[in-house]
Image: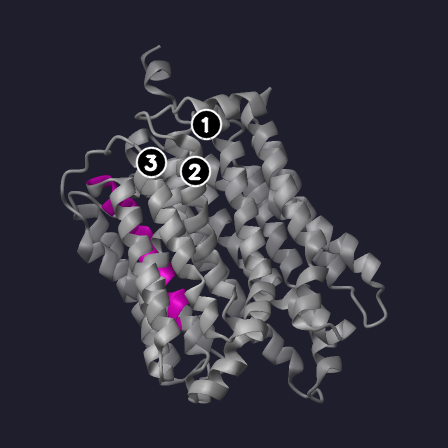
Amino acid sequence: MESVDLARAAAAPPQGGGRVALATAGLLIGMLLSVLDQTVVAIALPGIAADLGGMDAIGWIVTSYMLASTATGALYGRISDRFGRRAVFLTAVAVFVAGSALCGLAQTTPQLIAARTLQGIGAGALFVLPTIALSELYPQRLRSRVQGFTGGVFALASVGGPLVGGAITDAWGWRWIFSINLPLGLLAMALVAYALRLPRPGGDGKVDLAGAALIAGAVVSLLLVAEWGGRAYAWTSGVILGLIGAVVVLGALFGWRERRAASPLLPLRLFADPTLRVALPATALLGALLGGSIVYLPTYLQAAYGMGATQAGLALNPYVLTFMAVSSLAGARIGASGRFKPYLLAGAVIVVLGFALLSRLTPGTPYAVLAVELAALGVGFGLLMQNLVVVAQNAASPADLAATTSAAVSVRGLGLSLGVAVFGTLLTRELQGRAPGAQATAAAIPDVLFWGAPAAAVLVALMALLPRRAQHPTPGEAAA
């Protein structure tokens, strides 16, 4: 019955006469590109270094994109309130495509890093805006199911990135990793330009640029602390202490600014809602757990089982396929019942179990056992991923939908980036004193994954604190 409702919604556009199915496809392609380019480049870094040189700065090819996309994500919701979802999405894709073209043409490592930064500025919108627009295209009863598809796109792109990157690099060279974005980006633009028709939210014309600059500075400083602390610089070094001070000062100034801004980037009234006070930190923690698992599980497969990059990508199918299937199926079930809390609690408990099992891996563990454990983790994340965003959306008033969605998606992206950095620091610590090589890496990664279990236990506690029904009343309900 729910699938019939979804089909009817796509055939008979619910908002502004748009061709919903085509608009949805265009939005999801943009989302796919933004996540894919977080991971697709990593596998090509050796080839890029051999071609362009600058091995000492090669990590910034990944980091520059991550910093730019994370720092700008929160701004796009408010900009789209003022100028409309379609116009801002098209502009962001155009920036992303231009950055991709420049990446493919880069002749030096600094040029490539600059182009990746431009790419990241465009990519900051390409998960936030589709999440907002899809919640407006479809009625609230279908919101969880439709957002479940975006969780599947995230899983597919995150884990499939290295696989796609390796295949393209082997077949045509690393520049094609960026060139392939051009036709896909143009297709997304064409579909959205033709099909997406949403009424403009009608912002007051003011965009809180000062608040955006403050939060971007705080986010970049925090990510650099996580990336450099204990590795590039000692925790007590002047650089790290200065960055920590910048996080504190810029964060405090951001809070001061948001209390006084006429149109704040992040209205502080959102945190008066008991649902959002729980959902937003839970979303950030979920992102950290996602980041740690997505990045280091392929490394474990290569180190422990001697797999190549392509084999490791395929070996993650139990994780990816269960993530995608559960995200879609749970979204349909939850959308029909409106009962989020039992599913979210179950998902958090399963994530605890998944990390606990992965922490017990040994070099002799059969792959079949690992596959079951990966599937368990996929089930847990599938129950949580987009449903947490929908819980936040349902708790927000229509006027705050864009700000709430931007905040949820942005804190998840921040958490993901922090998770990758923190798990990397833990791995560096575990490898100290061990002879370098695949055997040491295979032995260290389960010890790192162990820390995912207590972190996920905090997630269980947060899910228990959620109100039983977290939903903002519609205007009709409010009037009644």
Please tell me which residue lies in front, 227 or 177.
177
Residue 356 in the image: state x and y as whole percent: 73, 57
The residue labelled by disc 2 is 24
Report the span colored magenta: 64-82
Q: Residues within 10 Å of mark 1 (few under 14, many from 20)?
A: some
**Label 2: which secondary element:** helix
**Quadrant holding the N terminus:** top right
Can see residue 209?
A: yes
The residue labelled by disc 1 is 10
| Amino acid at dot 2 | Thr
| Amino acid at dot 3 | Leu
Residue 400 in the image: state x and y as whole percent: 30, 36
Residue at position x 36%, y 38% from top?
133
**Label 1: which secondary element:** helix
Q: Are marks 2 and 1 in contact (CB under 8 Å)?
A: yes
Q: Quadrant of residue 11?
A: top left
Separation of residues labelled 3 and 1 (CA atoms) = 12 Å
Q: Earlier in the sequence, mark 3 or mark 1?
A: 1
**Label 3: which secondary element:** loop
Identify the main secondary structure in magenta.
helix
Please tell me which residue lies in front, 103 or 227.
103
Task: Decide whether residue 206 is among the magenta residues.
Answer: no
The residue labelled by disc 3 is 196
| Amino acid at dot 1 | Ala
**Quadrant holding the C terminus:** top left
Can see residue 394?
A: no
